[in-house]
Image: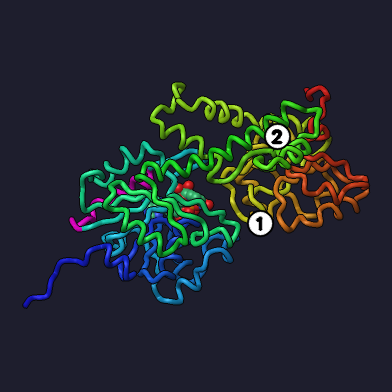
Amino acid sequence: MQPSTSPRPLLAALQDRTEPVTVWGAGFIGLSAACALAQAGFPCTVLDTDEHRVGEINAGVVPLPGFEDVIPLAAARSGGRLRAASPDDTAAVAARVHLVCVNTDRAGRPVTGPLTTVLTAVGRARAGGETLVALESTVSLRWLDDLVPAALGAAPATDASLHLVAAPRRDWMLSPDMNLRTLPRVVGTARPESLPLARELYGAISEVVHPAPDWRHAGLTKPVENLYRYLDLVLTNQLAEAYPGLDVPEVLRLAGTKWNVPTFHPSIGIGGYCIPLSPRFAVDGTGHPGEETPLPLVAAAMAWDGDHPARVAESILRITDGPIGILGLSYAPNARIVEGSPAARVTEHLLARGADVLLHDPYFTPEEITALTGARPLRWPDDLSGLGTLVAATPHDLYADLPARLSALQDPPALVDNLGGYGAALRGTAVPYAEWGTPAARPSAAPRP
Ligand SMILES: NC(=O)c1ccc[n+]([C@@H]2O[C@H](COP(=O)([O-])OP(=O)(O)OC[C@H]3O[C@@H](n4cnc5c(N)ncnc54)[C@H](O)[C@@H]3O)[C@@H](O)[C@H]2O)c1
């Protein structure tokens, strides 16, 4: 009797963890997924167009500075089941299981190019058998309806051999405890028959999997959950503008004592990859991205938030006398993330108004600081003494002794504290202090000429 040549059913191969998985994109999302899958037992290839990232991963180096302790690359490689390659690796492209983790934004806007390229390659390589494609990248629902079928060259609802999955990510990448395994995973499929496969795959790496009615419901979950936070944060910043004579952080602390109200703090801007992008994905997904949007509240918040850096720059200029220093380019502490940097946006407005701006961030070289923002590099801590105003944008650990350093200066700059963390240590000192959102940070003096 001839041995059977038909491939094993995909569900069975997922159940015993023998099915090779291809992960597209070796950023935080793709590399962490690949590591988790390899640790769960799947042979895993992560593909990236960035040859440097590919080389580093194969050398055992996490190619994302600041995330060395969060991504378990060494443990994942120790089983011999993880490798990286470029997207022309024909065996990986022809795999039956694909996780798509490429970037879907650039310069603060959703983009479709990388997703289209990957899905087109997967669609071309399909040999006719079962294929599972899971979208971990953040997507607009419009893309699920139009872009994905067109790029794959398939009809998601009727192609019985195609298992399309939306499995958005919600990690808080700076916390090792809030990761793929521990955070509940929302997963939905284009056809109900694909759900057992998606549950098998994601059940292998996540403790809790929440099945959605379908992939559209799963896909929308990601923008919506971040949209709540975005609207809260815009409202927080609006309150600080609306009540310039009040200590708004104190009002918010008091409001936060109510059982169903989180405590927010006004800030110089909303940063990062996910939250500022969420309104764009949510509005686009309605299919009415223009003035006819059925999400007018979101559109109004985006418009107001777009003007926020200019307002912040204006307030800083009212306080300042002399060069302005800014501490922190990365929006999040102790990480190198330039995307959505509020400090960069405010710097742009300060420079446009003719201000002398110096910027420091321990995660960027002086050359990078100037190339990314146009500001002069600030030498930490030597340049603190020559400043008129210092904006503490991001509380990197390196700046933990900032209050002591400023207190020791003969003529310290006024400190504008974005998140209010340095106030207690400066109480009773000669350092002029303005917590963002308080009257001290919003002087009502006539605007500078
Ligand atoms: N970083 C987060 O915390 C986070 C959280 C939730 C969701 N997301 C979403 O996940 C997705 C990926 O995020 P990220 O932070 O890992 O992005 P990233 O930009 O750090 O990484 C994306 C990688 O994809 C690679 N790439 C681009 N085109 C490619 C192609 N054609 N073939 C192979 N590789 C290609 C890029 O070179 C890059 O290394 C985005 O949609 C993002 O919105 C990110």
Secondary structure of the residue carrying tag 1 is loop
Query: Left or right: where does residue 348 sit relative to residue 413?
Result: left
- Quote the CA–CA distance across marks 1 and 2: 25 Å
Which residue has dot 1 on it?
334
447 relative to 41, above or below: above
Query: Which image quadrant for residue 287?
Result: top left
Instruction: Residue 310 in the image: state x and y as whole percent.
Output: 67, 30
Q: Earlier in the sequence, mark 1 or mark 2?
A: 1
Q: Ligand 1 near label 1 (Cβ, under 8 Å)?
A: no
- Most foreground residue, 94 or 158: 158
120 relative to 324, above or below: below
* Residue at 32%, 53% in the rendered image: 195
Instruction: Residue 48 in the image: state x and y as whole percent.
Output: 40, 58
* Residue at 50%, 72% in the rendered image: 74
Viewer-nearest of discs 1 and 2: 1
Mark drawn on residue 213: none
Name the dominant secondary structure of the magenta segment: helix
Q: What span is colored magenta in the figure?
A: 113-129
Q: Is residue 325 visible?
A: no
